[in-house]
Amino acid sequence: MLTPASALAAVFEPRRVALVGASDRPGTVGALLWRNLESFPGEVVPVTPSAASVAGRPAYPTLRDVEGEVDLAVVAVPAHAAAGVIRDASAKGVRAAVVISSGFAETGPEGARLQRELLAAARAGGVRIVGPNCLGVQNCDLPLNASLAPGLPGGGGGISLVTQSGAYGMAIYTLGLDERTRFAKVYAAGNKADVGDAELLRYLGSDTASHTLCFFCESLSDGRAFFEEACRVTPHKPVIVTKTGRSPAGARAALSHTAALTGQERLWRAALAQAGVTVARSGLEMLDAARALDTQPPPAGPRVAIITNSGGTGVELTDLLADEGLEVPELSPALQEELRRLLPAYASPRNPVDITPVWGRFTELYPALVDRLARSGEVDAVVPVLLQRAADEAVTRAVRDAAIKLRVDGVPVPVYVCWVASRATRAGADLLQEAGVPCFEWPERTARAIGHAARYGAARTRVRQRPSTPPRPAGLPTMPDGLLDADIAAAVLAAAGIPTVAHRTCATVAEAVAAAEALGYPAVVKVLHPSLPHKSDAGGVRLGLPDADAVAAAARDLLALAPGARVLVQPQAEGTEVVVGGVRDPQFGPTVAVGLGGVLVEVLDDVALALAPLSVAEAHHLITRLRGFAVLRGARGREPADLAALSHLVRAVGDLLAAVPEISELDLNPVLCGRDGCVTADWRIVVRRPR
């Protein structure tokens, strides 16, 4: 069987290509593909049983009949004939096939059967399949256009685009061409019957021509593998993902707060963010982020300088950058004084630097300000706004030259141009983009692109290689399937080093009173029964019980809630209520969640997710992402929580989930966080052994 690297090398860098379904009859798919493959520097072999030659070149009736080796087969035959072609490819030793043909799983049960047949034929002979039902692939540097797209963009390396939607992918690609974006490779995945996103990410991550990687996905079935590959790639290359088909998690009965909070969209967003992946909301936003990152270094921080000849546009951009978590800081008095000597008397050097409509000096002022601000050490990015008359060719050339000089001199501050001008002046924007100076139309697109670039710059330094699976804790008790008994669950937590409040389980009122006397007052009494997993919702929790009579009354009420019920008796503990838990997701595997609010966590919906296992530093970062993080730090006179202890507890939960695969859900709610530690007051573990 071919390794993934060699299989995709056959797709993107073949020496010899066979076009199955080749034709020179105008208007046919075979003719279009034949024409597109004309630029390929290697040999293209026509394969068709319906003609002796194609465009004057001898044709072979089947792949088996082709003389010599074939690296890549491009298949454009009816769906019912495709499996036979792949069987021929297997017999011939073809390494990979791009199946353009449609009529497979996207059409229904019969198409799904044909797709299974196609894949079985491929696996029997070690042929890797791109598609089916795909637009094809392109390598802009080879060049190779094994696709339905009419032409290739310029080569020289750049953005590589993986798109599951062929038509929409072509729309993004066309927009990129219109805005002078360089592409390295384009891959239309279609039905993704064989080659997955993680395998593509691994290949493109090591491809020197692919500088920035874009994935436009409808599905991400190999989520965990993609996450782990992304952790290896993003410290060195930007990876940008747009995922369509966002929807709530499938309906199922969740036995824990954590399971209810980890919706599928929230989970994949968290996983990608943890891996340093940039998540864009749309194809346009993805392409803008890619252009911001492809030819310039990411900003080293959040500080942005704006140069504008319009106060209103500068203020709008300032507001939009703030929405992205960036700032437009006032420049130091010394730098303002230096800029003031360059500017007209009525201009503002504060930031935004407003040069006013001094049209005759635009060619002088814009490049001078770009250069001085980028070298000042006071900002992390510079944005000249080229508005109306500032968007003429002389000014754009001057800004371009200033940005190039900064790169030559090794100044790591990126320059992004905000373009607010008529379409008639678009040649100036093209000039900038062709020189590697990203140019975005209007402040909103500019701010979003810079926001993504800055977040990537910050995230890539936090990404680490994933650790090996932690060892299974010693001393774990026997765990039957289903919701674990409270004592067994507590023993599991103890084996993992997760502290719980002292407790006793009791079956009678007398036992409850004796437990409270032994553990101390004030006491807490909680119902225990498999049909009442959410105790508070059932009225099954009584807090702050001061004496034996109160405990007896509470126990009597709670034992009557369900036949066979027991009660859990604990001493009252104090602290800020936090939820820590985890689930085992079918795509992403063990996942940890942290939230604020105790029993109100689902109402507050303040939760952060990450894939396990985690380091203590990653656990701490996860906690800081909570909107209510200030509460844990002691906002408004509250006692601050022991964040180190909470971080270690979160890491321990992640290790437990990663090491014990039969645990499917785990819920610690609440964890009470005080100044000197954290302790779990209530816990719930669900065991479902993998089938």
Image: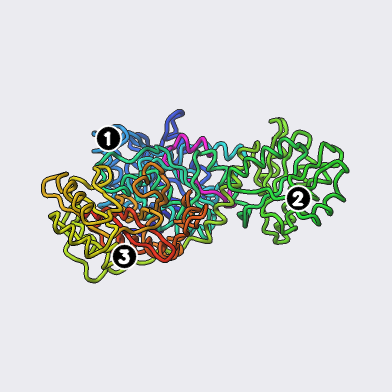
162 drawn magenta:
yes
Against 1, residue 343 (above or below) is above
Answer whether labels 1 and 2 touch (C-beta < 8 Å).
no
Q: Please identify, in this view, whether the residue under mark 1 or under mark 2 is nearer the observer.
A: 2
- Earlier in the chain: of badge 1 and badge 2, it is 1
Residue extent of the magenta highlight: 155-173
Q: Quadrant of residue 687?
A: bottom left
Question: Which amino acid type corresponds to the residue marked 3 in the rendered image?
Answer: Pro
Q: How far apart in space, not on screen, are marks 1 and 2 (Cα)?
A: 57 Å
Query: Is residue 348 shown in magenta?
Result: no
Residue 499's mark? 3
Q: Residues within 10 Å of mark 3 (few under 14, many from 20)?
A: some
Provide the residue designation for mark 1.
Answer: 111
Judge the density around disc 1: few (<14), some (14-19), many (≥20) Cα neighbours within 10 Å.
Answer: some
Residue placed most toward the observer, 529 or 418: 529
**How crowded is the residue under tag 2: few (<14 C-alpha within 10 Å), some, or many (20+)?**
many
Q: Which mark is residue 144?
A: none
